[in-house]
Image: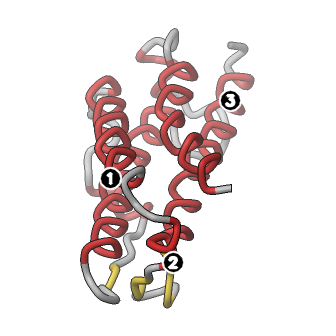
Amino acid sequence: MLSDLLHHYETGPRLVRQAVHHMTPEQLDARPVAGKWSTRQVICHLADFEPIYADRMKRVIAEEGPMLMGGDPDVFASKLAYGDREVETELAIIESTRKQMIGILKTLQEADFERVGHHNHDGELTLKTLLERITGHIPHHLETIEEKKRALGL
């Protein structure tokens, strides 16, 4: 149901903040699971892709069949100082992006969620599909954060 999806989208940032609330800088930077990003890197990744998805959704809402560009998370991680960024700043970006977008999304009619954009890798995507993907992004990464915390004994 669309109202449930919007609720989960709106409440996602609180879950991220709660997951990292008591972690020290050392714990945020630890990589206890081989081949996986640190928690800091995960938070930076979330903060980088929230505005990308917000832009995609805005284009689908405002334009007719816009082109939507993909981004490579590993390239972002290697080039955008993920190890040096402040977690609080990144959390604020996630929160403010979703706060702005939920205000927009709540004004739409149900039919608006069937509007489409054309992703350069994934083809035609509806606004609802974009919203489902970004809404599921935080829970997906919360699982990896919890895995790291368990490995650290937290």
Q: Residue 132, image x and y in percent?
A: 58, 60
Residue under numbered circle 2? 114
Task: Specify whether residue 154 is in view.
Answer: yes
Which type of secondary structure does the marked residue at label 3 adopt? helix
Which type of secondary structure does the marked residue at label 1 adopt? helix
Mark 1 neighbour density, 10 Å: few (under 14) some (14–19) many (20 or more): few
Which type of secondary structure does the marked residue at label 2 adopt? helix
Q: Marks 1 and 3, how far apart in space? A: 31 Å
Mark 3 neighbour density, 10 Å: few (under 14) some (14–19) many (20 or more): some
Please name the residue shown 30% across and 30% down the image: 92
Q: Earlier in the sequence, mark 1 or mark 2?
A: 1
Mark 2 neighbour density, 10 Å: few (under 14) some (14–19) many (20 or more): some
Q: Give whichever of 104, 79 is nearer the camera.
A: 104
Split into 4 quadrants, where in the image is the C terminus? top right
Q: Which amino acid is tagged 2? A: Glu
Residue under numbered circle 1? 104
In-image side of 35 versus 27 (left or right) = right
Please name the residue shown 34% across and 80% down the image: 68
Q: Residue 28, image x and y in percent?
A: 47, 24
Q: Earlier in the sequence, mark 1 or mark 3?
A: 1
Structure colour scheme: secondary structure
Split into 4 quadrants, where in the image is the N terminus? bottom right
Residue under numbered circle 3? 146
**Looking at the image, is 72 positioned above or below residue 29?**
below
